[in-house]
Image (spheres, rainbow, N blue to C red):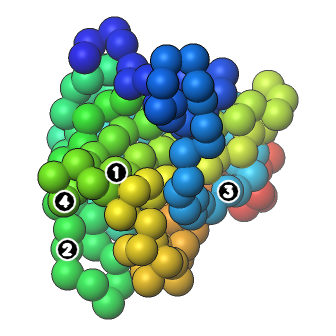
Amino acid sequence: MAGTTPEFYTRKKGFQFGRKKGEVKELPGVKLEHRVGVQAPAEVVWEILQDVEAWPSWNPVVSQATGAVRIGAPLTFTRQIPGRAPETINATVLDWTPNELIHAKRTRLGGLATVVSYWEIDALSETGCVFSNGELFLGLGRGGAHRQRGPLRKAYAAVCEAMKAKAEAEWRARSGAPTSAS
């Protein structure tokens, strides 16, 4: 899989699938996410995000993480969502772009349910960006997304707010620039 991506995903069109070669239809799914503005450069957010093994030091939802940001590489992390048992997520990096995104995919139920976890950074200026964290639930995974929508959205919000605080503190320490906390 190294260097290639499945046919249902293209960077230009996003997540889709085709029944016959050339016939493409939108892939039905459920997308849950949270987005937050960060008064720090996308590069600062990326430095924090790409250091997978350091996620537990700033991410209130992740207690353990290992892996490399490389297409086809395993990405394993233990997620603790309030009110639920800890969940170990074993995913594979589907796509990544420096200073922009990490997408990781996992399947369940023998491939009938697919979940794509994503972390995205949209640069707005040289010193500001939007950080997004969420998951796309496909196939039979859609039902689980509906049932757990509230706790998952709270978890994504906690991750985004923690990233905002960490990135702005890093940027403030480096540049002395004002941030949301100033």
Q: Nearer the viewer, residue 176 or 158?
A: 158
Q: Give, as a three-letter code, the residue at label 4.
A: Leu
The reply to whether the C-beta atoms of the residues labelled 4 and 1 are less than 8 Å apart is: no
Q: Residue at x 16, y 52 (%)?
A: 110
The residue where tag 2 is placed is 86
Q: Give, as a three-letter code, the residue at label 1.
A: Thr
The residue where tag 1 is placed is 114
Distance in Å between CA atoms under marks 3 and 4: 29 Å
Q: Residue extending furthest front?
A: 20
Distance in Å between CA atoms under marks 2 and 3: 24 Å
The residue where tag 4 is placed is 109
Distance in Å between CA atoms under marks 3 and 1: 22 Å
Give the image location of residue 38, x and y in percent.
71, 48
The disc, 3 or 4, on the residue closer to the chain's N-terminal end is: 3
The disc, 1 or 2, on the residue closer to the chain's N-terminal end is: 2
Q: Is residue 175 above or below residue 70?
A: below
The residue where tag 3 is placed is 35
For mark 3, does the 10 Å Cα neighbourhood hold few (<14), some (14 to 19), or many (20 or more) residues?
some
Q: Residue at x 33, y 41 (%)?
A: 105
Q: Residue extending furthest right?
A: 125
The reply to whether the C-beta atoms of the residues labelled 3 and 1 are less than 8 Å apart is: no
Q: Nearer the viewer, residue 145 or 36?
A: 145
